[in-house]
Amino acid sequence: MTDKTHRIAIYIAMTFSSLCFLQTCGSKGKITDNKKKIEVLETKVDSLINIVGSQPTAIDIKYEMEQAMYKFLIYEDDLDKGKTSLSDIKSKIDE
């Protein structure tokens, strides 16, 4: 090989190596970003699974029933006197 072809071969090899290096660096950054996004999504999915999978306890159900009964008692006197209807009471309780 002559000196000129040797320089061209080195230049081509260095350019090719630089391009490969830059390609790899860019890919690693994207992979790292994707891994972070996946971790965040996994955390959100896990928390949603916990919420969906959880069932109310007997204490929770009893508390909700007592609250509904208490709210009904507030409006019961008006119902007895004919001032309101059951549908009105239901809409007031659901608010």
Image: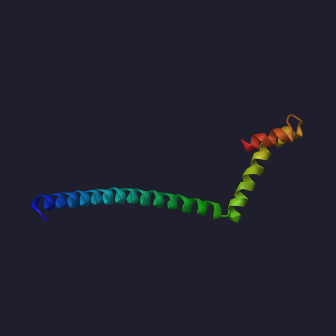
Residue projecting furthest to the front: 2
Residue depicted at 29% across the width and 60% down the height: 20
The image position of residue 5, as x and y in percent, is 15, 60
Q: Quadrant of the N terminus?
A: bottom left
The image position of residue 67, as x and y in percent, is 72, 51
Question: Is 72 placed above or below 18 here?
Answer: above
Q: What colouring method underlies this structural image?
A: rainbow
The image position of residue 86, as x and y in percent, is 85, 42
42 relative position to 14: left or right: right
Question: Toward which corner of the image does residue 14 lie, by quadrant?
Answer: bottom left
Residue depicted at 32% across the width and 57% down the height: 23
The image position of residue 50, as x and y in percent, is 59, 63
Q: Which one is in front, 38 or 75?
A: 38
40 relative position to 73: left or right: left
Q: Quadrant of the C terminus?
A: top right
Q: Which one is in front, 64 or 48?
A: 48
Question: Toward which corner of the image does residue 75 lie, by quadrant?
Answer: top right
69 relative position to 37: left or right: right
Q: Which one is in front, 80 or 42?
A: 42
69 relative position to 59: left or right: right
Residue depicted at 46% across the width and 61% down the height: 39
Q: Which one is in front, 10 or 34?
A: 10
Residue depicted at 32% across the width and 60% down the height: 24
